[in-house]
Amino acid sequence: MSDIEAREAHILGRPPRLEPLDPEQFSDEELAFVRDLWKAMGIEPLPQLPEYFATMLRYPELVQRQAEMSTTLNNGKLPFRVRELIILRVGWLCQAPFEWAQHVKAGKRAGLTSEEIDRVTRGSADPEWNEADRAILAAVEEMFADSMIADATFATLEKHFSMEQLVEIPFTVGAYQATAYLQNSWRFRLMPGVTGLADR
């Protein structure tokens, strides 16, 4: 827990590097875009625009392109649970409080238990994973370590996933690694109701 507290103090212990827009600065088109994005992600509408979106709407074209990639992946061929395993492992390896906490919630919607989410922090080395889950987590770890999936891991993945699903795996890792970099670098504050890297 002390490591988590130190990491979160490092990222969140100072103000964000970019302030969110005031609510009166949002256009109706921008608000509709965010609501449509939430719908595609299975998020219930919120009464107030979270700081993350209120900040990123300073750059609407960029956030729209990022959202298109996320929406494409969300509507892709990988099962929801597998996609969330990937994103959680990325969030943990990046030690990204915002991404981790949001995807703990998403992971539970996808059917992951708190115990499985805790095991994600130990990665593919945990002996309780089945073969497919272990290979998914190993693929994420190998891409972080060597920028590619190792042959043995790829051979295991081929037993459980279609070629189209296999193509989505590196895209998912890259997209959410970039998101973690953004959120950490701009020191986005956590959304209400989450506690960051301690969430399970």
Image (cartoon, rainbow, N blue to C red):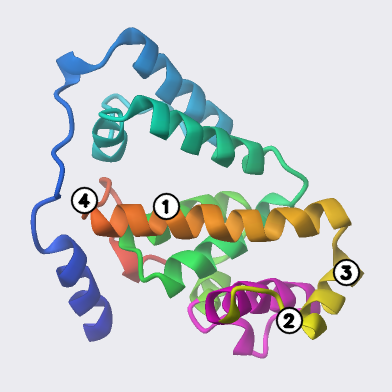
| Front disc: 4 or 2 | 2
Disc on the earlier residue, 1 or 4 = 1
Along the horizontal axis of the image, is 103 left or right of 131? left
Residue 45 shows which numbered tag? none
For label 4, the residue is: 189
Residue 150 shows which numbered tag? 2
Along the horizontal axis of the image, is 65 left or right of 17? right
For label 3, the residue is: 158
Question: What's the distance in space between the residues labelled 4 and 2, CA to CA?
Answer: 36 Å
Give the camera-side residue of 27 and 196.
Answer: 27
CB contact under 8 Å: marks 1 and 2 = no
Question: What's the distance in space between the residues labelled 1 and 4, CA to CA?
Answer: 14 Å
- For label 2, count other residues whose C-alpha is less than 10 Å away and answer few (under 14), some (14-19) or many (20+): few
Amino acid of disc 2: Ala
For label 1, the residue is: 179
Q: Which residues are magenta?
A: 121-145
Q: Residue at x 63, y 54 (%)?
A: 171
Residue 129 in the magenta stretch? The answer is yes
